[in-house]
Image: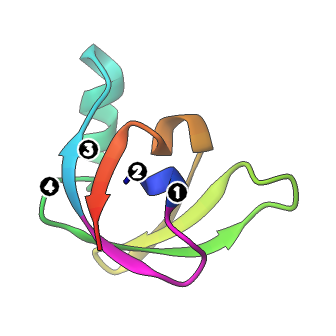
Amino acid sequence: MTLAELPLGKTAKITTVGGEGSLRCRFLDMGLIPGTQVRVLKVAPMGDPIQIHLRGYDITIRKEDAAMIEITS
């Protein structure tokens, strides 16, 4: 399952972070690190972007980017 598929309000743990080069580094810099708990807070009316909560702060990412992050419930 990917972060893009996680339902609103649910919590999961990141297992792998995809992407290549600077995109993957950006994910890791934002705190999207394997083992981190994430929760979907909001989804935009058209479904993109999504707001997630992790490590005590909130970030908003595109659904296309969230699809590169694998999670387990």
Q: Are marks 1 and 2 in contact (CB under 8 Å)?
A: yes
Vertical arrangement, residue 51 with respect to residue 40, above or below: above
Please state which amino acid type lies under the numbered disc 3. Answer: Asp
Residue lying furthest left? 35
Q: Are marks 3 and 2 in contact (CB under 8 Å)?
A: no
Foreground label between 3 and 1: 1
Residue holding disc 2: 2
Residue 5 disc label: 1
Please state which amino acid type lies under the numbered disc 2. Answer: Thr
Residue holding disc 3: 29
- Residue 13 at what x, y percent from top left? 24, 69
Name the quarter where the C terminus is drawn.
bottom left
- Residue 43 at what x, y percent from top left? 71, 65
Residue 2 sits inside the magenta stretch: no
Residue 34 disc label: 4
Give the mark, 1 or 4, whose residue is nearer the N terminus: 1
Q: Please give left or right for residue 56 compared with residue 5 in the image.
A: left
- Chief secondary structure of the magenta portion: loop
Which SS class for mark 3?
helix
